[in-house]
Amino acid sequence: MVIEHLKLPVQLVDVNFMKGEQLTEEFKKINPQHTLPTLIDDDFVLGDSHAISVYLINKYAKDDSLYPSEPKLRAIVDQRLHFDSGILFPALKYGFSQVVLQGGKKQTDDAVEKIISAYEFTEQFATKTWLAGEQFTIADISCVACISGLNELIPIDAQKYPHLYAWLKRCSELDIYKKKNAPGIKELGEIYRSKLA
């Protein structure tokens, strides 16, 4: 979504995670961690969506709106990015893999607990228009990717999490979300639901 927001011309290469294409020797030569996404910018290679987003913004953005330079604003954005990688993504990975990759027919209590905890934290962060305040930032881009995936596993209760629900709705109305996140989330949901009992 950052690439779309910045209108960067890129060549995307599909790597089928479900088929383990990121585990090939060829891919490991590019990224020894064999993680997705991976960016190749001339002779520079970088893994991790947060690191890639920050790099692209620092190198190509015309202003600092996505990643504010003011120290306190940036610190809040950075905190939300760490929250995404430390809480949201692990909850999504665990919940998805319990059913899809490990053959469970329903969510485990542990997975449900992780997802609900992620919702509760995000509800507290979503009391303003955007997760890091009144300005749309990479915190929203990064976190909505995981929250929208979690929403496919356990739909967000609008009564219980009104701020989170409203924030996700705002994000889902953005063109970059519709073009770059919605198709993948739809596919993730279909794969997940096909494995449920």
Image (cartoon, rainbow, N blue to C red):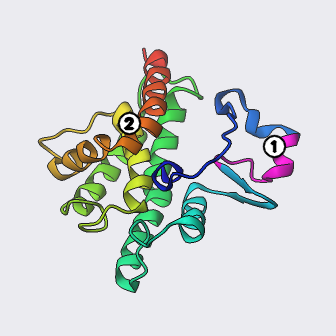
Q: Is residue 27 magenta?
A: yes
Quarter of the view holding residue 126: bottom left
Which secondary structure lies at badge 1? helix
| Image location (x, y in percent) of residue 83 | 42, 62
Closer to the camera in the image, 173 or 113: 173
| Residue at numbered disc 2 | 178
Judge from the rendering whether residue 40 lies leftward or rightward of residue 131; answer left or right. Answer: right
Amino acid type at circle 1 is Phe
Residue at the image position 83 percent from the left and 37 percent from the top: 24
Q: Residues within 10 Å of mark 2 (few under 14, many from 20)?
A: some
In the rendered structure, which segment of residues is drawn in magenta? 26-37
Quarter of the view holding residue 43: bottom right
Closer to the camera in the image, 138 or 104: 138
| Residue at numbered disc 1 | 27
Q: Is residue 197 magenta?
A: no
Which secondary structure lies at badge 2? helix
Residue at the image position 65 percent from the left and 28 percent from the top: 18
Most extreme residue toward the left is 159
Quarter of the view holding residue 50: bottom right
Q: Is residue 109 among what the camera can see?
A: no
Q: How many marks?
A: 2
Judge from the rendering whether residue 19 lies leftward or rightward of residue 138; answer left or right. Answer: right
| Image location (x, y in percent) of residue 104 | 50, 24
Judge from the rendering whether residue 8 lies leftward or rightward of residue 105; answer left or right. Answer: right
| Image location (x, y in percent) of residue 144 | 38, 48
Residue at the image position 60 percent from the left and 69 percent from the top: 59
Closer to the camera in the image, 68 or 186: 68
